[in-house]
Each structure stands twice: as structure tokens, then as C-alpha cells.
Image (spheres, helix red, strand yellow):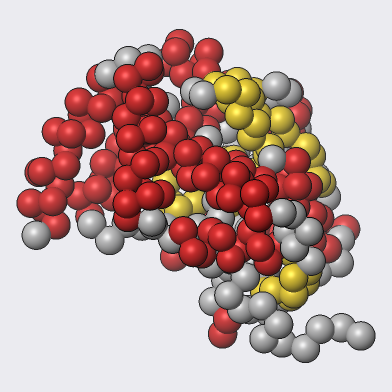
């Protein structure tokens, strides 16, 4: 069944990858209409999340953020297909790095690094960063259930020599690379909710008490990796600009979870600036208040 699904959908994906950007975003608008008004995919989750974190916003504002966030998501979804055939020059013109020297400086000091970002739309073209660095670039991802589509995603995202690491393979792969002495850059998006039974750090995220992933900080301390925050700004449809902010090059100087909290505050700041770019369809706050809050 999974193979049949792939055989059916792949030709559609290939055709989408060949259309002009004008047509691509017409298709994105059509997909938005189906997702938001017909299927109503996670519409209730999006609405509840927004009401929870923005209690002072009006109903009109909540609805507007909800719709725009889904439009941004369908744009990103379509752009992922476009990645199959977009030229390198075209991608460089559409996905720009404002201050890549932040990464280059750490690289020139022979220190591997972790780039931390939030689940914001526009990330699909991040892999072009390989053309601006000497690092081996890796991104941590969650494997798709359909192995054929999983292979396709890997092929799309490895066009520029980037590599995908499944979440369960992350620590092992990083440890092996560190032992061999390679110079690597890893991309983590650690703002979503961890499993409740594996949670050992809680803090306020968007003023709500929730468990928080700490893996990136622990790995950085274990291997003395630099930590950098990545902000993605959508300039207009099909055009993005990335800004890097160095968190630290000396992670072992910080108390446990201090770096994780700094990262989450940066995610918060970005959400408050452009809430419509955030992925609200994830049930990020489902474990809220399941452990006592500090006095």
C-alpha cells in the first residue's frame, strides 16, 4: 500500500516541482482552501493554541493568525516539492543568509556547532547553507512512516550534500563524528514537546509551564560544541532571509538547562514578532501544568 501511494503521488510531486513560482503559489492557495475550509486539518488545535498563548488578542486577530499560518505552511509544503528541480542560483537568490560570518567564524576556530531554530515555516531551503560553509552539515529529523517518501525527503534535502539524521540515531552519529575529529554543523529544532515520561526539565514557554527538550544543550556540553540560534524571516512569498545569533562557544561554562532556556526565550521572541510563521498545528502545550510549578 505504501509503495502504491508513492507511485500515485510521485508524478504529481514531480509536475509541481517543474511549474513556475507563480503557478506554485496558485496551487498553494488551492491547497490552503482545501486544508483550512474543507478538511479543516488541525484547525481546532491551531485555534486552541493561539487562544492559549495570546489570551489578550481579539477573536479577529486569532482567526487572522490562524489563516495566515496555514497559508505559510502550505507555501512551505509546496516549496519542498520545488526543491526537486530548483536551480542552485535560484535558491541562493531566494534563501539568503544575512550574517553567515557568525557560522564561518566558529568554523575557522575549528569548533563544531549546533544551530538551533524553532518550527517556523520556510525552513525547507535551509540546506543551501552547504554552499557557504566548509562544515559537514547535518539536520535532525523525524523519519516518515512511508519509507518511500522518507527516501524522497532525504534525496531532496541532500541535493547540496546535507545529511539527515533520524532522532534515534542522533547521539550515536554525533559521538562517532566527534571521535573521528570531523568538523560538523548540526541543525536542531527542539521547541516541540518531549515525551512526558522522558521529561526532566520544565519551564515557562509562552507563559505556560511545559516540559522542554534538553538534548541539544547536553550534546553541546558533552562535545564542547558552539550553540547558535537561527531566525528565518519571510520577506515575501518565496523569499527568505536567515539571521544567526551566537548563543555561546563555551557551553560547559553554563549551569544545566540555562542554555536551553536561553534558546526557548529566543524562540518566544521570534513568535511574538511574527506569530503567523510558527507551526501552530503541533500540540505543543498538551502536557501543560502536569508537574508542580515553582513557588
User: Toward which corner of the image does residue 15 lie, by quadrant?
Assistant: top left
Give coordinates of residue 154: x percent, y percent.
33, 42
The image quadrant that residue 291 belongs to is: bottom right
Front-most of 203 and 201?
A: 203
The residue at the point 81 percent across, 84 percent down is 293
Q: How many marks?
A: 0
| Percent position of residue 92, x then y | 51, 16
Question: Up-down: is 165 above or below 25?
Answer: below
Q: Which quarter of the figure is the N terminus placed in?
A: bottom left
Residue at image x 55%, y 40%?
68
Residue that lies at the very extreme toward the bottom in this rendered image: 292
In this rendering, does residue 294 appear at all? yes
Q: Is residue 107 left or right of residue 34?
A: right
Quarter occupied by the C terminus: bottom right
Image spot of residue 294 (x, y percent): 87, 83
Residue at 75 percent across and 41 percent down: it is: 273
Is residue 110 visible in the rendered image? The answer is no
Describe residue 292's horizontal placement relative to residue 276 as left or right: right
x and y percent of residue 48 in the render?
58, 66
| Residue occupying the far right of the picture | 295
Residue that appears at 25% across and 19% down:
18
Compared across the picture, whether 141 is left or right of 135 comes to left
Residue 182 vs residue 239, the one in the foreground? 239
Amino acid at each position: 500500500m505504501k509503495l502504491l501511494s508513492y507511485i500515485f503521488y510521485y508524478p504529481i510531486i514531480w509536475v509541481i516541482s517543474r511549474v513556475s513560482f507563480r503557478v506554485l503559489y496558485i496551487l498553494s492557495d488551492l491547497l490552503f482552501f482545501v486544508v483550512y475550509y474543507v478538511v479543516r486539518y488541525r484547525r481546532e488545535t491551531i485555534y486552541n493554541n493561539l487562544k492559549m498563548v495570546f489570551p489578550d488578542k481579539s477573536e479577529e486577530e486569532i482567526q487572522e493568525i490562524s489563516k495566515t499560518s496555514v497559508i505559510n505552511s502550505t507555501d512551505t509544503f509546496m516549496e519542498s516539492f520545488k526543491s526537486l528541480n530548483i536551480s542552485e542560483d535560484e535558491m541562493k537568490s531566494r534563501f539568503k543568509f544575512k550574517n553567515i560570518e557568525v557560522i564561518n567564524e566558529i568554523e575557522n576556530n575549528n569548533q563544531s556547532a549546533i544551530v538551533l531554530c524553532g518550527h517556523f515555516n520556510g525552513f525547507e531551503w535551509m540546506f543551501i547553507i552547504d554552499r557557504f560553509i566548509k562544515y559537514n552539515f547535518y539536520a535532525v529529523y523525524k523519519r516518515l512512516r512511508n519509507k518511500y517518501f522518507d527516501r524522497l525527503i532525504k534525496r531532496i534535502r541532500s541535493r547540496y550534500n546535507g545529511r539527515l539524521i533520524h532522532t534515534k540515531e542522533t547521539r550515536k552519529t554525533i559521538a562517532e563524528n566527534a571521535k573521528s575529529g570531523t568538523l560538523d554543523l548540526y541543525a536542531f529544532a527542539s521547541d516541540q514537546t518531549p515525551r512526558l515520561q522522558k521529561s526532566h526539565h520544565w519551564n515557562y514557554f509562552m507563559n505556560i509551564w511545559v516540559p522542554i527538550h534538553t538534548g541539544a544543550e547536553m550534546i553541546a556540553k558533552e562535545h564542547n560544541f558552539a550553540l547558535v540560534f537561527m531566525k528565518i524571516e519571510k520577506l515575501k512569498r518565496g523569499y527568505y532571509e536567515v539571521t544567526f545569533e551566537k548563543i555561546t562557544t563555551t557551553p560547559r561554562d553554563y549551569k544545566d538547562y540555562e542554555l536551553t532556556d536561553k534558546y526557548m526565550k529566543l524562540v518566544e521572541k521570534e513568535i511574538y514578532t511574527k506569530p503567523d510563521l510558527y507551526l501552530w498545528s503541533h500540540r505543543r502545550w498538551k502536557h501543560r501544568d502536569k508537574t508542580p510549578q515553582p513557588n
